[in-house]
Image (cartoon, rainbow, N blue to C red):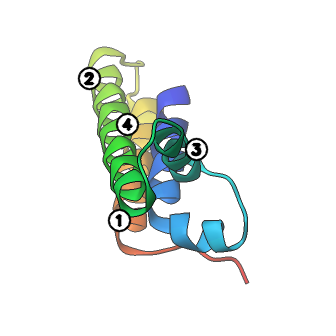
């Protein structure tokens, strides 16, 4: 569950980072961007490095979810299937849309 939550959170942060920065909210992108700036990268370079980091982190978390799904099975298979399907759906959703509650 922890890896599923991390994957979904990273997918959300990747898609919503511009809006959330404008709203002065902190997310993984902002944290990574600040870390790169602290190491001396400026403007667009820090932004690109943060983007690469988030993509790498997200891909790693999805891979962990897939590995856990393949290794851990309940008698019915329902809980783990629901979790991995939620990860897949959410990451696909955030790849296309910015979820905004109005």
> Dot 3 corresponds to which residue?
31
- Give the SS element for disc 2: helix
The reply to whether discs 3 and 2 touch (Cβ–Cβ < 8 Å) is no
> Dot 2 corresponds to which residue?
70
Q: Residue at x 42, y 31 (%)?
A: 80
Badge 3 or badge 2: first in the primary sequence = 3
> Dot 4 corresponds to which residue?
57
User: From the image, which quarter does the N terminus lie in?
Assistant: top right
Q: CA distance from mark 2 to mark 4?
A: 20 Å
Q: CA distance from mark 2 to mark 1?
A: 24 Å
Badge 3 or badge 4: first in the primary sequence = 3
Relative to residue 18, is residue 64 drawn left or right?
A: left
- Give the SS element for disc 4: helix
Quick check: 83 above or below 70? below
Residue neighbourhood size for the residue with mark 1, other residues' Cα within 10 Å, grouped as few (<14), some (14–19), many (≥20): few
Badge 3 or badge 1: first in the primary sequence = 3
The reply to whether discs 3 and 4 touch (Cβ–Cβ < 8 Å) is no
């Amino acid at each position: 569950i922890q890896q599923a939550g991390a994957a979904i959170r990273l997918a959300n942060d990747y898609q919503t980072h511009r809006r959330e920065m404008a709203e002065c909210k902190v997310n993984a992108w902002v944290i990574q961007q600040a870390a790169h700036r602290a190491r001396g990268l400026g403007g667009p370079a820090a932004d690109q490095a943060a983007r690469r980091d988030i993509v790498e982190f997200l891909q790693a978390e999805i891979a962990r979810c897939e590995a856990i799904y393949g290794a851990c099975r309940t008698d019915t298979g329902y809980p783990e299937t629901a979790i991995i399907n939620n990860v897949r759906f959410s990451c696909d959703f955030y790849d296309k849309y910015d979820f905004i509650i109005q």
